[in-house]
Amino acid sequence: MNKTKKSLGSTLGTIFFSIICVLYMYPIVMVVMNSFKKETAITTAETFTLPNAETFAGFKNYINALGAQGFLQSFGYSAFITISSVALILLCCSMCAWYITRVNSKLSKLIYMLCAFSMVVPFQMVMFTLSQTADSLNIFGLRFNTPWTICFIYLGFGAGLAVFMFSGFVKSIPLELEEAAMIDGCNPLQTYFKVVFPLLKPTMISVGVLETMWVWNDYLLPTLVLDIKKYRTIPMLIQYFRGSYGRVEMGPMMACIVMTVLPVVIIYLLGQKHIIKGVLAGAVKG
Amino acid sequence: MASVTLKNIKKIYPNAQKKKRKGEPEKKSNLKITAEGVVAVEDFNLEIADKEFIVLVGPSGCGKSTTLRMVAGLEEISDGELLIDGVKVNDVAPKDRDIAMVFQSYALYPHMTVYDNMAFSLKMRKLPKDEIDKKVREAAEILDITQYLDRKPKALSGGQRQRVAIGRAIVRNPKVFLMDEPLSNLDAKLRNQMRAEIIKLRQRIDTTFIYVTHDQTEAMTLGDRIVIMRDGVVQQIGTPQEVFDHPANKFVAGFIGMPQMNFYDAELVKEDGKYAVVLEGAKVVLSEDKQANLAKNDVKSQSITLGVRPEHIQLKGDASQMIHGTVDVSEMMGSTIHLHVNACGQDSIVIVPMNDIHEEGIDVSIGAQVSFTFRGKNVNIFDRETEKNLEF
């Protein structure tokens, strides 16, 4: 009786999650499929059918996307912004979380509260002032409306989640390890880089994957901050496949989307087991 | 190799924690609370000679680990002076004190191999590679962990990890070796084994040791001298034998020795210049040395707490000196038997050798009537109120 109940439950579960899975996968499959079709086939009734001899376009859409719209340049900007932002977030936030966790002062508590608070402030609330600020800010000749410096803005927005996740994990690192390092001859910076940093690896990967997905796919922030005429990241570029008079180049757009999604999917697949580990780390006192 | 001097060392945790404690109605310890905060260690004075093995012992929360951490530089010294080789090191960073420490939780770097763990401090000191290699292999040999050098700590057992932790400390050849309850995470058998190894190790590396433990067996077997602490205050400093034979107060008497010393409410009487103790009508005259000590302190006849160790209680003696009781529990230990005897309205523990039981046919079954006494040279006399040993 119990066994049948269990198997019935698991069968229902399998069916339910299979449906969810199909719902999630459907748009992606559509995009991939249509990226190999001719422009005319996408906008007609053949949108939902598999490509056939007539509609199959091979890699033409991909070649168009790569050539015509400056895809490689945008890819470069996106890659640079993502790598610099995520690296900066990982380094600064893990250090900050270490300080907050280990130094028990009012200041450290305040920083922690501010970081936690920043997670609940919607981006839309600050975006108009942000674009103004980014345009006018000029620190020793350093401007923040270029792809080379936008990472500092990402650091601000990404810090909340990252510090929160890192603090949870740092708490689970025994203090004795750091004390042992101090006795072994490390100064605080060496203690951080030689002992704490390597131990944070699982959390680094999970925070890294989450932040990468966010920065790579982010459309709003770069649109607001960057000079659109000069610098286009990939999400911005995709918008430019919508030409004037409502004309949309569907083929190259689909191809572009596939190429954009691919790196994130690869990173996610490589790091997925660490994501669960990192999110859960520090949740329970070990 | 160095001498260590602690002069009036004090540790006070500031008021923030005092307030927290105030909020809690039940306090765990009897630590003194002053206007400045909670006094964790009070007026600690100790001269540790070069190559001496000192053991700090006491119950949890007595300040022994705090003291050790102050010597290590991991805890700030609130007041007093700490000298290593005559040089004041109060404000010297841990890395510059030339000390090594073994932690209770081993504190091995989990991301490094055993070799890297042991070489870490030498690398930080920028020693040449071949010298590091030589030192690590030497230490590994001493501790018999050469075959584990390529493993990560998680692949080692508790005992092996402890050896690595010790190895990490000895490669440095430090002036002072600090150990914070290094054996308390091990099971009983391994603990005995490691204890013996520490004694051997000590003979080999011959340096100054400060060892913290709450286990009195470790304290007695390892230490040249023992420092017994309670609530942040040093109770007694002495060799294991001194502390065992002449405890300075009731706390030390109860803490050192297994099973614990028996305490009785008794009377100290002085008749014709001779001191004797009277317990339940049994009168035992004290030995000459005790007489002399008490006379020197001019101790009057008074109510006292009498302390007698279980191994000093005997079941034979003068009929007028016998105390009568009933056996409540008898614990067979192999060569001896521990009797819990209900006498004088309390539980007394008596250790009886099995030979005596066989030879004299003593009945030690539960509920049996037994009589016991003790010798005048084996008693400890404590003031009923201050709990101090009246001989001191």
Image: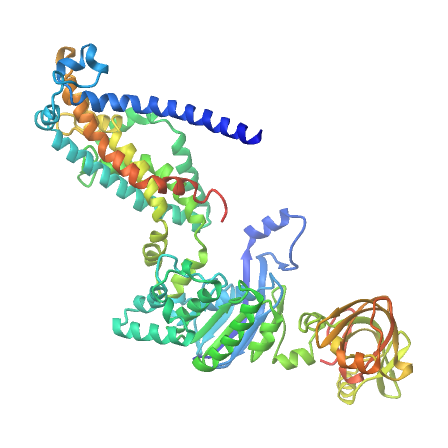
**Residue B295 shows in this picture:** yes
The quadrant of the image that shows the N terminus of chain B is bottom left
Q: Residue at x 41, y 48 (%)?
A: A170
Q: Position of residue A59 (x, y in %)?
A: 11, 26
Q: Residue at x 77, y 83 (%)?
A: B294
Between residues A212 and A259, which one lies in front from this camera angle?
A259
In the rendered structure, the answer to whether residue A265 lies left or right of residue A248 reads: right
How was the colour assigned to the protein in this rendering? rainbow
Residue extending furthest left?
Answer: A67
In the rendered structure, the answer to whether residue B267 lies left or right of residue B108 reads: right
Q: Residue at x 85, y 87 (%)?
A: B274
Decide: is B322 above or below A245.
below
Decide: is A60 above or below A197.
above
Q: Position of residue A140 (x, y in %)?
A: 19, 41
Q: Position of residue B68 (x, y in %)?
A: 51, 67
**Residue B76 shows in this picture:** no
Q: Position of residue A253 (x, y in %)?
A: 17, 22
Occupied quadrant, residue B151 = bottom left
Occupied quadrant, residue A163 = top left
In the rendered structure, the answer to whether residue A100 lies left or right of residue B193 reads: left
The quadrant of the image that shows the C terminus of chain B is bottom right
